[in-house]
Image (cartoon, rainbow, N blue to C red):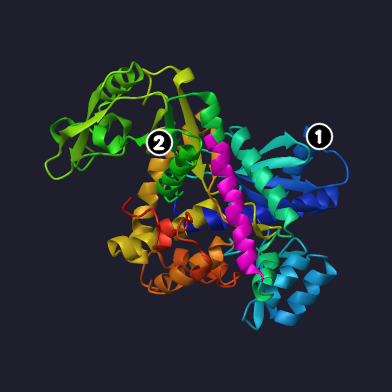
């Protein structure tokens, strides 16, 4: 079972502080944490010299010393102006800028081993319990900091994900050309009334990704396109938008629903409570699914099913698919990256696309914007208007959603041929308007109160952005409502 997300964040924040202090002690330089990477935290040591594994081993020994000595992490509440001056003196302008943009008269800093810093959220009282971690040296002064994510206490090994890392790198390069690296930069664009143009530029970048994906599909001549990714990544809108781009290349995309190939309920696997388990790949009639795909590829006319969730059985409603020269099949779902799903189809006949929001936008150099938090905010908002759920109900379900992703999606990300990054640099400002009131409904009596407060705290760093600037074909409309693609 996954560990409580709030406590993982506290543990991670403590280790980030230990690592930052150790880097200062050993190398006399700063460290930054730009984004997450494969169940870990991508870390850059900002040294003027190239570090070696020997240097990283020394760094780990210093971290272990700080942890072994169980040094107290002291919370200090200081005046806003004093914190601003402190960060300006330390040449951390983005942190000083963030302080200018919050309403609080005071700011919380933390002190460890004579060094002061700030990390979003709460901090452990001391370093003694932070002994479970792993550093993986990537070269070029880059590391991955990993911590346990489930109740086994096992620290996952870092698995290189070059395509995802490259997606982060390219996005980072792009936003730097627009003069944006941190939230403070984005807030300046908003306050200077330039956000409409910025949104348009970001939307053009998203459309360029879809154009490139369509061009690659056209060039590949592959007939089966599999699209997958974690919850609230914008898979539905991305798939429908991609279909339009494919049509501009003269192709005819045909959508094939994976849900329609569920096994009949009497044959479905059940979970520990005896309820039908629709999440596992075992719930899909793989034999029928692969048989149909093979027959379609061979040019046969195939009658495809529609799954009736009321009766729990597949029904055939005279939907016939016969692939013509320009036809291609789009399949979107939880298991599409898993080779087991289409094991009967050779790799030269299919192309896999991984869809997820990867943003390199940082709150500051020590506090990154989590892709999980982005997806959670999207989910809270969509659940509210489309299902009538409270924010607390969504948070209650989120751990189960995450467990499914960890089991069924993330192990197969390296199977993807193409990455579609569905993050928008400005989206937190838009989502804040919808999510903040919903999160305030969670009271201190709730077990999810601390998590709600953590999210509210980082939302306060962002200026709000009106959704009137978000076009109706934007992926965000899948979550805030008003999508051109809804019902299509």
| Residue located 78% across and 70% down the image | 87
**Residue hosting label 2:** 408
Q: Position of residue 485 (x, y in %)?
A: 38, 53
- Mark 1, mark 2: which one is toward the viewer? 2
Q: Which residue sits at x=61%, y=67%?
A: 196
The majority secondary structure of the magenta stretch comes to: helix
Relative to residue 85, is residue 446 drawn left or right?
left
How far across and down, in percent of the image, does residue 341 sit?
36, 26
Residue at 69% of width from left, 46% of height from top? 43
**Which residue of the protein is positioned furthest toward the bottom in this rendering?**
105
* Residue 109 appears in the figure: no
The segment highlighted magenta reads 194-214
Give the position of the N terminus as an image quadrant.
top left
Residue with the mark numbered 1? 52
Instruction: Identify the residue at image location x=20%, y=38%.
Output: 307
Label 2, secondary structure: give it.
helix
Return the x and y of residue 153 as percentages of the image width and height: 49, 41
335 shown above or below 240: above
Please indicate whether residue 29 sits to the left or right of residue 3 in the image: right
């Amino acid at each position: 079972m996954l560990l409580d997300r709030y406590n993982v964040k506290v543990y991670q924040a403590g280790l980030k502080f230990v690592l930052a202090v150790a880097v200062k002690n050993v190398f006399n330089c700063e460290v930054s944490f730009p984004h997450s990477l494969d169940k870990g935290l991508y870390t850059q040591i900002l040294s003027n010299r190239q570090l070696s594994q020997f240097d990283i081993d020394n760094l780990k020994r210093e971290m272990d010393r700080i942890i072994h000595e169980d040094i107290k992490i002291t919370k200090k509440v200081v005046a806003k102006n004093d914190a601003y001056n402190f960060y300006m003196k330390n040449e951390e302008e983005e942190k000083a800028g963030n302080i200018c943009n919050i309403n609080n008269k005071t700011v919380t800093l933390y002190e460890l081993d004579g060094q002061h810093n700030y990390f979003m959220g709460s901090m452990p009282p001391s370093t003694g319990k932070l002994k479970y971690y792993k550093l993986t040296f990537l070269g070029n002064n880059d590391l991955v900091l990993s911590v346990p994510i489930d109740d086994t206490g096992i620290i996952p090994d870092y698995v290189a994900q070059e395509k995802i890392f490259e997606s982060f790198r390219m996005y980072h390069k792009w936003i730097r050309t627009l003069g944006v690296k941190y939230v403070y930069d984005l807030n300046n664009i908003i306050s200077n009334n330039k956000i409409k143009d910025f949104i348009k530029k970001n939307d053009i970048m998203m459309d360029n990704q879809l154009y490139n994906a369509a061009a690659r599909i056209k060039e590949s001549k592959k007939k089966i396109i599999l699209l997958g990714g974690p919850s609230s990544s914008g898979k539905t809108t991305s798939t429908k938008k991609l279909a339009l781009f494919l049509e501009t290349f003269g192709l005819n995309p045909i959508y094939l629903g994976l849900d329609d190939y569920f096994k009949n309920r009497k044959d479905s696997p059940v979970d520990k409570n005896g309820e039908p388990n629709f999440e596992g790949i075992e719930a899909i009639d793989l034999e029928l699914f692969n048989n149909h795909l093979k027959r379609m590829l061979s040019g046969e006319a195939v009658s495809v099913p529609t799954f009736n969730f009321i009766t729990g059985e597949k029904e055939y409603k005279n939907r016939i698919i016969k692939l013509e020269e320009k036809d291609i099949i789009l399949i979107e779902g939880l298991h599409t990256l898993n080779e087991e799903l289409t094991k009967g189809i050779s790799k030269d006949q299919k192309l896999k696309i991984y869809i997820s929001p990867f943003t390199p936008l940082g709150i500051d150099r020590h506090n990154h914007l989590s892709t999980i938090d982005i997806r959670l905010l999207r989910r809270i908002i969509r659940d509210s208007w489309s299902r009538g759920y409270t924010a607390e109900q969504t948070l209650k379900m989120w751990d189960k959603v995450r467990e499914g992703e960890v089991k069924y999606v993330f192990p197969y990300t390296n199977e993807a041929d193409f990455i579609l990054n569905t993050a928008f640099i400005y989206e937190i400002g838009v989502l804040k308007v919808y999510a903040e009131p919903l999160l305030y409904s969670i009271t201190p009596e709730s077990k999810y109160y601390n998590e709600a407060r953590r999210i509210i705290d980082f939302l306060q760093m962002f200026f709000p952005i009106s959704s009137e600037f978000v076009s109706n074909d934007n992926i965000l409309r899948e979550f805030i409502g008003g999508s051109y693609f809804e019902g299509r």
